[in-house]
Image (cartoon, rainbow, N blue to C red):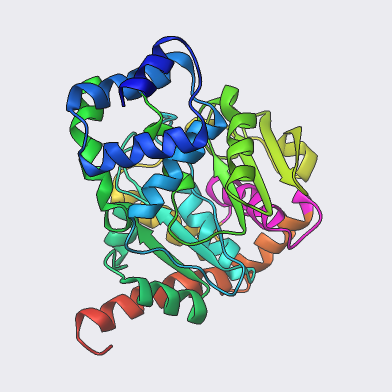
């Protein structure tokens, strides 16, 4: 570890193999808290590279007891959080719309960190179990086309860095990697990020992690979601190439709303919003989900344009297919609790 810290102190980058080795030591408790804090602090001060982020992700996924490699193509649409917008659970609601459009979604998420209500909080409120074993996740993806993976359960190694991150009180590399650590082997991905300056970097990381197609987005107002309040910045990964575009609501036939109009609240409030969208209610919540689900469907490659993706998202909601995906998870969870399955 001394060699790695010296390199970072000199402003040098770690190779992917070096970062993987350093992260293995971090997760296994082989290094002191002081060394762990120095590693995270120096990386943040220098600026993390794609190799360093990918190396950390590889080490963390090695430790996961829930790694799944499936025959079917699977995607995720998780964001980093951290935008401070207090928006409703946009990506979680959009995940059911994407699944309703016929795309398998392994939705990776956690409880609230920077927002009032995380994906796990709202789904738990609705009755969805957070305790699926790997084999149950595989069954849900096969039967329902969507499953939820609760981050603390699939990445217990993160406990080793909780105290150091808390003591540092500044953003570190761990504030970037959440959407990258899904234990299911993903083919495609929509990744939201609150740091616009990291868009291309995260696209490079997704390329290194083997994604066939992906979109990284930073929304208007620096949301880690697509926003209808103005200009969204996207990086598209396709055929190994990265392309940057901007997208405004009028480009895809959607109205403009301020980010204040999509604010959520506690788990009860956000659950009500999610259900209203999936039941077909019109307004800023639905239109925001249409934008994000449409981008997700495009990221998956099911359509050739975001506009086509939005049309597929409308069909998913209006046909009842998106709501049926959520209702299946709720019903399955209730049966499991009652010992039926």
Decide which of 305, 58 is in the foreground and name it: 58
Q: Residue at x 77, y 60 (%)?
A: 303
Query: Is 107 located above or below residue 17 in the figure?
Result: below
Q: Which residues are magenta?
A: 282-307
| In-front residue for pair 140/276 | 140
Q: Nearer the viewer, residue 5 or 79?
A: 5
Which residue lies most toward the bottom here? 340
Q: Quadrant of the N terminus?
A: top left
Q: Is residue 305 left or right of residue 115?
A: right
Position of residue 92 relative to residue 14, above or below, is below
Q: Is residue 187 magenta?
A: no
Name the chief secondary structure element in magenta: helix
Q: Residue furthest front?
A: 3
State the image coordinates of residue 179 (x, y, percent, origin top left): 47, 45
* Quarter residue 102 falls in: bottom right
Is residue 210 left or right of 323 when viewed as pictured?
A: right
Residue 170 in view (yes/no) = no
Residue 187 visible in the shown view: yes
Locate residue 328, reporting x and y percent: 42, 77
Looking at the picture, how far across and down is residue 134, in whole percent?
Answer: 36, 71
Residue 292 lies in the magenta-colored region: yes
What residue is drawn where x is 39% and y is 11%?
Answer: 9
- In the image, 145: left or right of 127? right
Q: Nearer the viewer, residue 214 or 337?
A: 214
- The location of residue 254, given as percent across then percent down, is 71, 44
The residue at 48%/42% (across/down) is 79
Quarter assignment of residue 221 = top right
Q: Quadrant of the C terminus?
A: bottom left
């Amino acid at each position: 570890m001394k060699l790695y810290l010296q390199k970072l102190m000199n402003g040098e980058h770690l190779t992917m193999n070096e970062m993987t080795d350093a992260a293995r030591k971090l997760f296994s408790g082989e290094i002191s808290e002081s060394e762990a804090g120095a590693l995270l602090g120096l990386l943040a001060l220098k600026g993390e590279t794609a190799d360093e982020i990918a190396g950390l992700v590889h080490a963390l996924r090695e430790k996961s007891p829930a790694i799944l490699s499936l025959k079917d193509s699977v995607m995720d649409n998780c964001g980093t959080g951290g935008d401070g917008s207090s928006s409703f659970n946009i990506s979680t609601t959009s995940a059911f719309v994407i699944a309703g459009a016929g795309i398998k979604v392994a939705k990776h998420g956690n409880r609230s960190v920077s927002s009032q209500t995380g994906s796990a909080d709202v789904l738990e409120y609705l009755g969805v179990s957070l305790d699926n074993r790997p084999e149950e996740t595989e069954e849900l993806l096969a039967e329902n086309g969507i499953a939820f993976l609760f981050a603390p359960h699939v990445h217990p190694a993160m406990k080793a860095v909780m105290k150091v991150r808390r003591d540092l009180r500044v953003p570190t590399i761990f504030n970037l990697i959440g959407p990258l650590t899904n234990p299911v082997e993903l083919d495609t991905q929509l990744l939201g990020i609150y740091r616009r300056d990291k868009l291309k970097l995260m696209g490079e990381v997704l390329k290194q992690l083997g994604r066939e197609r992906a979109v990284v987005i930073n929304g208007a107002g620096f949301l880690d979601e697509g926003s209808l309040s103005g200009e969204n910045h996207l990086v598209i990964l396709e055929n190994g190439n990265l392309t940057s575009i901007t997208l405004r609501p009028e480009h895809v036939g959607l109205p403009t709303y301020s980010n204040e109009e999509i604010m959520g609240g506690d788990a009860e409030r956000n659950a009500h919003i999610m259900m209203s969208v999936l039941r077909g209610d019109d307004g800023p919540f639905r239109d925001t989900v249409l934008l994000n689900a449409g981008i997700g469907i495009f990221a998956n490659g099911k359509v050739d344009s975001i506009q086509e993706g939005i049309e597929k998202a409308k069909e998913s909601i209006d046909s009842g297919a998106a709501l049926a995906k959520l209702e299946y998870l709720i019903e399955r969870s209730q049966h499991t609790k009652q010992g039926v399955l």
